[in-house]
């Protein structure tokens, strides 16, 4: 079975500070992992995805995530936060069936202070 | 990237009426579509998965007769909330998946039942 745990429902950082959003996964098959961002009253936008190629994945808007099998983690980072990064972030793991449903974490609300 | 259009973005309806939400893949054929429900400050809950031309597969606890899903073509799926009640008020998001790639999300629909 697949599942995702996001540690910390809220993260606050100052503008220019490092952003670290934590995600741990559980998967019975080699995982496909995703990070999505959601702005208020909008759908989800894909930030980046891990599909068993490089363990360090670079995404849009300066975000990146590192897949660590030994830690079953896929934490999202950004070296320098921007005000526009304030949003809800979801980590997800793809199910093992051919339908490819996603299992989402509970989300982390990122607040960026000026 | 691939575009999924969800319509309407917001809808207010009276209790007891039915509301239809459309999800269209604009530039690709979606073999599978997913419907999610999102409660305030919570993650996405998968409601059902549908493949074109076949009946939708509903998640446990989701009422088939209340949330009617039709996936009549490779570019269109609809979710109809029948006899809506205030507790059905929520944010509904669809996603569409081409064969063998990740899913793309619509912008979401904010349903308010008064």
Image (cartoon, coloured by chain):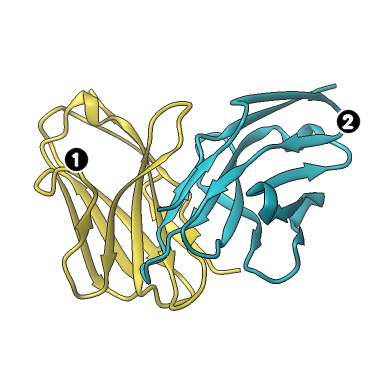
Chain colours: A cyan, B yellow
Residue beneath the point at 39% across and 73% down: B30
In the image, taking residue B3 as reference, residue B80 lies left or right, namely left
Q: CA distance from mark 1 to mark 2?
A: 42 Å
Q: Quadrant of the C terminus of chain A?
A: top right
- Asked where in the image residue B113 lies, by quadrant, the reply is top left
Residue A54 horizontal/vertical position (percent) = 75, 68
To the question of a shared chain for discs 1 and 2, the answer is no
Element on which disc 2 rests = loop
Locate residue B50 relative to residue A84 in the image: left or right: left
Query: Circles 1 and 2: CB distance less than 8 Å?
Result: no
Q: Position of residue B66 (x, y in %)?
A: 13, 43
Q: Position of residue A83 (x, y in %)?
A: 79, 32
Along the viewing direction, whichever of A20 and B91 lies nearer the viewer:
A20
Q: Secondary structure at mark 1?
A: loop
> Which circle marks residue B61 in the picture?
1
For mark 2, what is the residue? A17
Query: Which mark, residue B45?
Result: none
Where does the image place residue B10, in percent across and percent down from the top left? 38, 38
Q: Nearer the viewer, mark 1 or mark 2?
A: 1
Relative height, residue A37 to residue A49 (above, below): above
**Compared to A51, does A17 lie above or below?**
above
Residue under the image location 50 percent in, 34 percent down: A106
Q: Nearer the viewer, residue B5 or B96?
A: B96
- Dot 1 alpha-carbon crowd within 10 angstroms: few under 14, some 14 to 19, many 20 or more: few
Q: Chain of mark 2?
A: A
Residue drawn where x is 38% and y is 64% of the image: B24
Is residue B17 rendered to the left or right of residue A2? left
Q: Which residue occupies the extreme front position in the image?
A: A70
Q: Residue at x 88, y 41 (%)?
A: A79
Tally the marks: 2
């Amino acid at each position: 079975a697949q599942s995702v745990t996001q540690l910390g429902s809220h993260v606050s950082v100052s503008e220019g500070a490092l952003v670290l959003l934590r995600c741990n996964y559980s998967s019975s098959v080699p995982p496909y992992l995703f990070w999505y961002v959601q702005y208020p009253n909008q759908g989800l936008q894909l930030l980046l995805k891990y599909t068993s190629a490089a363990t360090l994945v670079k995404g849009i808007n300066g975000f990146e995530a590192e897949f660590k099998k030994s830690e079953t983690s896929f934490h999202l980072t950004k070296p320098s936060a921007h005000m526009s990064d304030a949003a809800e972030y979801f980590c997800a793991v793809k199910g093992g069936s051919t339908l490819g449903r996603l299992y989402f974490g509970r989300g982390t609300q990122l607040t960026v202070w000026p | 990237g691939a575009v999924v259009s969800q319509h309407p973005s917001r809808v207010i309806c009276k209790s007891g009426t039915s509301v239809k939400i459309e999800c269209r893949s604009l530039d690709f054929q979606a073999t599978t579509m997913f419907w999610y429900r999102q409660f305030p400050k919570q993650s996405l809950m998968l409601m059902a998965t549908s493949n074109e031309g076949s009946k939708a597969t509903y998640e446990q606890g989701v009422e088939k007769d209340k949330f009617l899903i039709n996936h009549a073509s490779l570019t269109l799926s609809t979710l109809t909330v029948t006899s809506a009640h205030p507790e059905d008020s929520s944010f509904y998001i669809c996603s569409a998946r081409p064969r063998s790639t990740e899913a793309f999300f619509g912008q979401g629909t904010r349903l308010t039942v008064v």
